[in-house]
Image (tube, grey):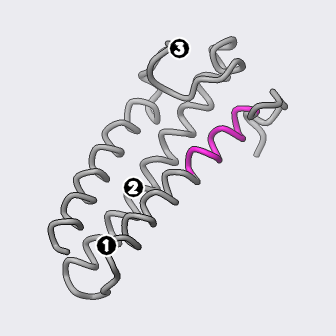
Amino acid sequence: MREVIIVLLIVDVLIILLGLPLAFGWVKRNSHYGLRTKRTLADPTIWDQANRFAGRALILAAGLHSVFCILQLSSVIQLSPSLTAAALTAGVGAAGALAFHRAGGATGGETVGRH
């Protein structure tokens, strides 16, 4: 079980590393990396806002999950490896869904920039 938690921590670090360039706005519009929708690819301002949000959301999700994993490794809490992996999947999925919604989602609605 310890090995699974360590692998999940490595995945958390990779997600954080992938989220940092997005959160800092270092990723320009492209067809390979970032939150790519019709709206984000069509407008550089929407691209920047949506991807900064997506990067922060990914960093938050993976950061919280890594704390959860560290608590498991230190025996503060004990859960099954599958539940721990599901928590990471749910966190990253929620981050992606929030970022997609903020970018206007599939409908192209005006949600970017609203607070």
Answer with mark 1 or mark 2, whichever residue precedes in sequence. 2
| Residue furthest to the front | 82
Residue drawn at 69 percent across, 11 percent down: 42
- The secondary structure type at the circle numbered 1 is helix
Report the Cα–Cα distance between label 3 and label 2.
Answer: 24 Å
Q: Nearer the viewer, mark 1 or mark 3?
A: 1
| Dot 1 and dot 2 residues touching (CB under 8 Å) | no
Residue 59 tag number? none
* Amino acid found under the numbered disc labelled 2: Ala
Q: Say few, some or many: other residues with alpha carbon within 10 Å of mark 3 (under 14 / 14 to 19 / 20 or more).
A: some
Residue drawn at 46 percent across, 47 percent down: 58
- Give 89 or 73, whichever is nearer the viewer: 89
Horizontal and vertical percent position of residue 22: 45, 31
Image quarter of the N terminus: bottom left
- The secondary structure type at the circle numbered 2 is helix
Q: Quadrant of residue 38?
A: top right
Q: Which residues are magenta?
A: 95-104
Residue under label 1, please give it: 81
Report the Cα–Cα distance between label 1 and label 3.
Answer: 37 Å
Q: Quadrant of residue 8?
A: bottom left
Name the chief secondary structure element in magenta: helix
Residue under label 3, please give it: 29
Residue drawn at 19 percent across, 82 percent down: 74
Question: Does residue 90 appear left or right of residue 80 in this picture?
Answer: right
Answer with mark 1 or mark 3, whichever residue precedes in sequence. 3
* Amino acid found under the numbered disc labelled 1: Pro
Rendered view: 62 above or below 54: below
Residue 62 tag number? 2
